[in-house]
Amino acid sequence: MKNIFLIVFAIFMAGSCSKENGNIPDVDTESLLPPIQKGIISTGSKGIPIPQGIIDNSLVDGFMVIAAWSDVEISEGNFDWSFIDSEIDRASAGNEKVRIAIHTGGSDIPTWVMQNYPKIKEIFVYDKRTFIKRYQPAYWDTQFIEIKSNFFKAIADRYSDNSSVFAISISMVDPNTGDWAFKIKDNEQKQSFLSSGFTETTFIDAYKTLIDNAMENCKNKYITTAVGPISPMLVSDEYFALYKVLNYAFNTYGNHLIIAKGSLNANTPNPNLDSNLRTWQLMWDFKPHCAGQFVWSVTNDPSYKMNGKNSYVNKDSIYSAAFNLGIIYGLNWIEPWKADLLNPNLQDELEDARNILIQ
């Protein structure tokens, strides 16, 4: 198994010395930033403590602390940090690092937002599990961006001096989770976006504002953000807006931003073999300023979701293949699911991958 990983690492190193599209300047990391986090970061569950077995696993370098905005900012300016504080304390005791990822979209938006600010423009999205229509603030609404930025400032004020925290996430498009999902199901939903003021320009400006505020309020932690396409029902080029925003961010803030995808699996397009990388083209073009999360676990998953629901190979091979692709993309850290990190049968694959990631 180790030989496979070493071959993949050699291929990655051979192709990682140039920035293909020339978008990322050679900007030194800001003096306030610590060395970039490398290795294995465990996924988390919203509001649920990380298992102690993961904290005790020497192959795991840290974990995500996930909470809902509505559970943290109980009312405007009134915060409950107890869960996040407790998890950071556990990480510190276990000599692990933390990425704070607070979901700020969909049902995780506090009810007080619309109650206090009824002029915020609304859109509707479909719940990914129930498919029920749900209204929420438009991602690009300037007042909503301001409120989200104020919330991020409160997070930064509390945790920017905590050495156990290495990154804090911001979200532009997150109707269901912290990952990007900008899909339009039908013309009715499309019209709700258009009538609420969506244009590529308003979207780009809002995303830039969100990034600017995060960078200004948190100069000594990495800022992570999920990325992805905009629905082709709204735009002619699904990725134009993202490239505009990311080029701006990297040219302005250098190494401070890390982009992330939550769909890494054994069927993720291989940039050395596939001509169409789809959403992963963003990760390839902006490497090495990127990180990734596995789409699912291989442990106790009869659907083989990590392999496109194809069950013709062993699950440890699926696990290795997914890690290999993450290494080829130059991901700084990879986030496997908790069940796999607790599975004794996958520790060899985990160790092989980590040994390369931390180099």
Image: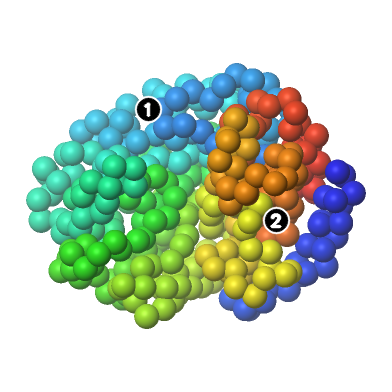
Residue 189 visible to the viewer: yes
The correct choice, above or below, for 117 with respect to 80 in the image is below
**Which class describes the residues within 10 Å of circle 1: few (<14), some (14-19), or many (20+)?**
some
Q: Which of marks 2 and 1 is nearer the N terminus?
A: 1
Q: Which residue is drawn at 25% across and 64% down?
A: 186
Q: Residue 95 placed where, x, y %?
A: 66, 26
How many angstroms separate mark 2 from mark 1 (CA)?
A: 36 Å
Q: Which residue is drawn at 62% across and 49% down?
A: 310
Label 1 sits on what residue type? Answer: Trp
Q: Do the CB atoms of the residues marked 2 and 1 lie less than 8 Å apart?
A: no
Left or right: where 88 falls relative to 208: right
In which quadrant will I find the N terminus? Answer: top right
The correct choice, above or below, for 178 with respect to 329 in the image is above
Residue nearest the observer in this picture, 166 or 321: 321
Label 2 sits on what residue type? Answer: Leu
Q: Residue 82 placed where, x, y %?
A: 39, 23
Left or right: where 112 falls relative to 227: left
Q: Which residue is drawn at 37% across and 27% down?
A: 81
Residue 142 visible to the viewer: no
Residue identifier under label 1: 81
Is disc 1 placed on a helix, strand or loop?
Answer: loop
Is disc 2 placed on a helix, strand or loop?
Answer: helix
Left or right: where 200 falls relative to 292: left
Tell how many labels.
2
Residue identifier under label 2: 325
Q: Residue 305 placed where, x, y %?
A: 56, 45
**Which class describes the residues within 10 Å of circle 2: few (<14), some (14-19), or many (20+)?**
many
Q: Residue 195 placed where, x, y %?
A: 15, 69
- Residue furthest out toward the front: 312
Q: Residue at x 20, y 58 (%)?
A: 123
Residue nearest the observer in this picture, 156 or 39: 39
